[in-house]
Image (spheres, coloured by chain):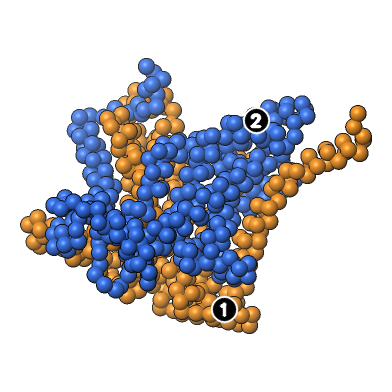
């Protein structure tokens, strides 16, 4: 027979064990995520240059940031890139999912072809598209050699058009993943509803517009959240594909933050741009996560 | 019959519509395959066939020279080391980072669903939001802290970074998965006197296969493909992605496109292999998790 004290100790240990197991992850997250966010916010109010300094300058960095031509370029670019990327990925993903859902022969072959780009690094994607779109050796030259002499595709070298080459490569990388999300949504729809509507004489087009697409609302929402989050974080693809160029034509907030912080030694401004990025993502993610958690509770 | 067909849509389409659908599907498979074709074909050509020929054409002279060069002799930055040492850096980084973050995620998910306590929702909410922060917000403090810890520019520094920012996702996956597991079974085991770890080991772990596949693939691809942390904190132990970028962006000497393509395939190979072997389980597991919620 065990002593009373020993049993007491063991049950108390069992009570504490779950919290002890969770504690390291929680502590690390508090420090490395939330502590670091506070650190960066603090730095954004200081005159830090190459190294962190604690001379407070109020909103000076934000004033400078918003006065920079360079930051405006980055914002215009992210607006163009994010909207095209989200809209095109959603349309392509939805169309492919609906088409694949028509009892297609060879679906098992097509699906992995659409999906494999998501396994690749943006640096690999960037490298492939960089040379493929290069007018000197890639697509344009191939067309010329095949006899289409007037063919011209020089977007990647054109500062007005280069941002669209990033859209092309980014859509290539992620649209298959969006397709998989919609396909899962489509396969989850009860066929009885569709059959009933067909008996009532609805055409395929009406069926999709009036019944199927509204039922896919959760998939649309997840796709939007994932794509906007990926768009704001986009860094590697730009670095590999255009390096932010030609000139500064494809600068995005993520590349802006990196170059101001680590190569131009304007850490205060870099930190303030990072804070702007966090605020943009928080504005999208917090309502979404909040509603998701509410629904499940 | 019915059950086999129930996966498919009940909508029927005409012959013209079907031809159109097949056409679109085939065109898109060309779009997705084209860059892969370009990479593979040009990685086995001599450079003169690319600069003096057609990038879309099949090789006239087949050579593995670009692959050998990309692997062991190409100029990366200032050193003619090829990508090999960086490939090893990536392996040394990815294996422990994936293992540690997955184990922690499984334990966290277990606690958050089967050993609930006051305010566990807030703990989970904080972990969850950490998945979605733009990493730019932690770059500067991380550089400072890694410096203070003396692990800046080392593989262990990168492992730490990837574990820290991977826990959120792995916890999310396991939590959602374990939430669907009947809590009564855990209660029954508790009444029988099984402890915290015994219940995890004997009851939850044996059914965790599908979600472990999801977690491992997710972490493996994300960490292997990471560029931002690698370029910021890699120092002399940079991962494969950073080395590939240095190889391709190098501004000195002749641009060896064939070597760049071979290097790109080398960088893509591990994640592609994982995807080919286990991709179907990944999508299935991911969708099962997100649909159930």
Chain assigned blue: B
Query: Above or below — where is B220 with respect to A184?
Result: below
Q: Residue at x 43, y 38 (%)?
A: B278
x then y, percent, for residue A171: 34, 53
Pointer 1 residue: A51
Q: Quadrant of residue B118?
A: top right
Residue placed most toward the observer, B48 or A74: B48
State the quadrant of the C terminus of chain B: top right
Query: Above or below — where is A102 with respect to B78?
Result: above
Is B207 on the left or on the right of B241, as rendered?
right
State the quadrant of the N terminus of chain B: top left
Q: Residue at x 23, y 36 (%)?
A: B22
Pointer 2 residue: B203
Q: Quadrant of residue A234?
A: bottom left
Query: In what element is the residue under mark 1?
Result: loop
Q: Colour of chain A?
A: orange
Are there few (<14), some (14-19), or many (20+) residues within 10 Å of tag 2?
some
Are there few (<14), some (14-19), or many (20+) residues within 10 Å of tag 1?
some
């Amino acid at each position: 027979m065990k002593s009373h004290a020993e049993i007491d100790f063991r049950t108390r240990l069992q009570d504490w064990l779950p919290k002890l197991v969770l504690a390291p992850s929680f502590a690390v997250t508090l420090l490395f995520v939330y502590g670091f966010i506070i650190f960066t916010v603090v730095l954004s109010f200081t005159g830090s240059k190459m190294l962190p300094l604690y001379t407070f300058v109020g909103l000076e960095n934000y004033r400078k940031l918003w006065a920079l031509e360079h930051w405006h370029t980055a914002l215009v670019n992210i607006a163009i890139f994010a909207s095209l990327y989200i809209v095109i990925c959603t349309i392509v993903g939805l169309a492919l999912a609906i088409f694949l859902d028509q009892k297609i022969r060879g679906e098992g072959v097509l699906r992995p072809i659409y999906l494999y780009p998501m396994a690749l690094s943006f640096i690999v994607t960037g490298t492939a598209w960089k040379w493929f779109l290069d007018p000197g050796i890639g697509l344009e030259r191939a067309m010329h050699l095949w006899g289409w002499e007037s063919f011209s595709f020089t977007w990647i070298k054109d500062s007005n058009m280069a941002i669209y080459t990033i859209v092309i490569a980014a859509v290539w990388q992620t649209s298959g993943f969006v397709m998989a999300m919609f396909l899962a949504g489509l396969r989850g729809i009860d066929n009885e509803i569709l059959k009933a509507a067909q008996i009532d004489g609805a055409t395929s087009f009406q069926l999709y517009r009036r019944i199927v697409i509204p039922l896919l609302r959760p998939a649309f929402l997840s796709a939007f959240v994932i794509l906007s989050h990926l768009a704001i974080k986009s860094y590697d693809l730009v670095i590999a594909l255009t390096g932010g160029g030609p000139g500064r034509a494809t600068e995005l907030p993520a590349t802006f933050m990196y170059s101001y912080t680590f190569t131009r030694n304007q850490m205060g401004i870099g930190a303030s741009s990072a804070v702007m990025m966090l605020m943009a993502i928080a504005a999208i993610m917090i309502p979404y996560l909040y509603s998701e958690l509410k629904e499940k509770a | 019959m019915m059950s086999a067909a129930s996966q498919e849509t009940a909508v029927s389409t005409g012959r013209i519509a079907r031809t159109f659908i097949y056409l679109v599907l085939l065109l898109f498979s060309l779009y997705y395959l084209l860059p892969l074709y370009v990479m593979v074909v040009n990685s086995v050509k001599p450079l003169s066939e690319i600069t003096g020929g057609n990038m879309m054409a099949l090789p006239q002279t087949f050579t593995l020279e670009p692959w050998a060069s990309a692997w062991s002799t190409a100029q990366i930055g200032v050193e003619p080391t090829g990508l090999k040492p960086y490939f090893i850096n990536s392996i040394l980084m990815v294996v422990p980072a994936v293992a540690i973050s997955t184990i922690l995620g499984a334990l966290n998910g277990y606690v958050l669903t089967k050993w609930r306590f006051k305010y566990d929702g807030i703990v989970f909410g904080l972990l969850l939001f950490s998945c979605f922060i733009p990493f730019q917000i932690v770059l500067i403090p991380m550089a400072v802290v890694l410096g203070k810890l003396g692990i800046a520019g080392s593989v262990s520094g990168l492992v730490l970074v990837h574990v820290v920012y991977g826990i959120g996702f792995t916890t999310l996956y396991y939590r959602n998965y374990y939430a669907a597991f009947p809590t009564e079974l855990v209660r029954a085991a508790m009444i029988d006197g099984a402890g915290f770890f015994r219940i995890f080991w004997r009851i939850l772990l044996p059914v965790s296969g599908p979600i472990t596949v999801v977690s491992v693939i997710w972490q493996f691809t994300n960490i292997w493909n990471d560029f931002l942390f690698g370029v910021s904190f890699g120092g002399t132990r940079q991962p494969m992605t950073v080395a590939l970028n240095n190889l391709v962006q190098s501004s000195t000497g002749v641009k060896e496109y064939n070597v760049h393509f071979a290097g790109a395939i080398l960088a893509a190979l591990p994640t592609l292999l994982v995807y080919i072997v286990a991709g179907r389980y990944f999508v299935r597991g991911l969708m099962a998790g997100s649909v159930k919620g």
